[in-house]
Image (spheres, rainbow, N blue to C red):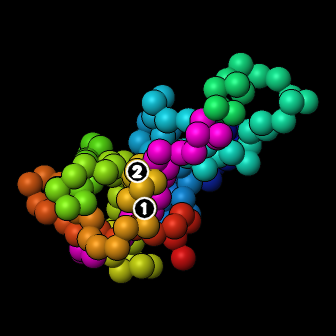
Amino acid sequence: MSAGKEFNVRPGCPNLIERIESGLLSYGNDITIKDNVLECHLDDFVSLSDEIEYLAKDSLKVLSAQGLKKSLIGIKIYADSISVLDHYPIFYNGDEVGELRSAVYSPNFKCCLGIAMVAKSHQSTIGTHQVIINNQDYQLELSPLPFS
């Protein structure tokens, strides 16, 4: 901090657009205490090998063997702006199938991009998903993370 003082250097972080476009997850927004590393695609950072011991390994092995019921996925909303201040339910044919966790307008993609936790059973469904934000209905398209 002192070395950069004359240049007005301060702590920073990626801006929201860059964070969401690149799939950089934010704890508290995209990931909560109710999620596990497998659902959040962080399994590259966890070993299920018998050679390595840690507290939650047995539980993660069970979850892995059972198959995931939900996971994080990208979403595209073809709108010019969006204001996401909370988690919002995602619907498919009237059934709640997930929740939007964060979103922002991306000038690079010319639409709003978001990160959502969606039931695996609905990640490959053909048709339109929807989310209601501030009493406005948005149609959305599911997309892999990071966005490309």
Question: Would residue 133 be found to the left or right of residue 142 on screen?
Answer: left
Q: Nearer the viewer, residue 8 or 142?
A: 142
Q: What amino acid type should be assigned to the residue bearing mark 1?
A: Gln
Q: Please, which residue is most extreme toward the top here?
A: 55
- Crowding at mark 1 (Cα within 10 Å: few <14, some 14-19, many 20+): many
Q: What amino acid type should be assigned to the residue bearing mark 2?
A: Ala
Image vertical order of residue 97 relative to residue 110, above or below: above
Measured from the top left, where is residue 35 in percent x and y? 49, 35
Residue 124 in view, yes or no: yes
Within the magenta stretch, is there residue 112?
Answer: no
Question: Would residue 118 be found to the left or right of residue 81 on screen?
Answer: right
Residue carrying label 2: 119
Q: Please, which residue is most extreme toward the right here?
A: 51
Q: Quadrant of residue 90?
A: bottom left
Q: Are marks 2 and 1 in contact (CB under 8 Å)?
A: yes
The label number, if any, that marks residue 123 in the structure image? 1
Q: Quadrant of the N terminus?
A: top right
Magenta segment, which residues?
63-82
Measured from the top left, where is residue 85 in percent x and y? 26, 46
Measured from the top left, where is residue 7 in percent x and y? 62, 53
Measured from the top left, where is residue 2 in percent x and y? 69, 38
Q: Please, which residue is most extreme toward the left here?
A: 135
Q: Quadrant of residue 106?
A: bottom left
Residue occupying image coordinates x 35% and y 62%? 104
Q: Nearer the viewer, residue 88 or 50?
A: 50
Q: Quadrant of the C terminus?
A: bottom right
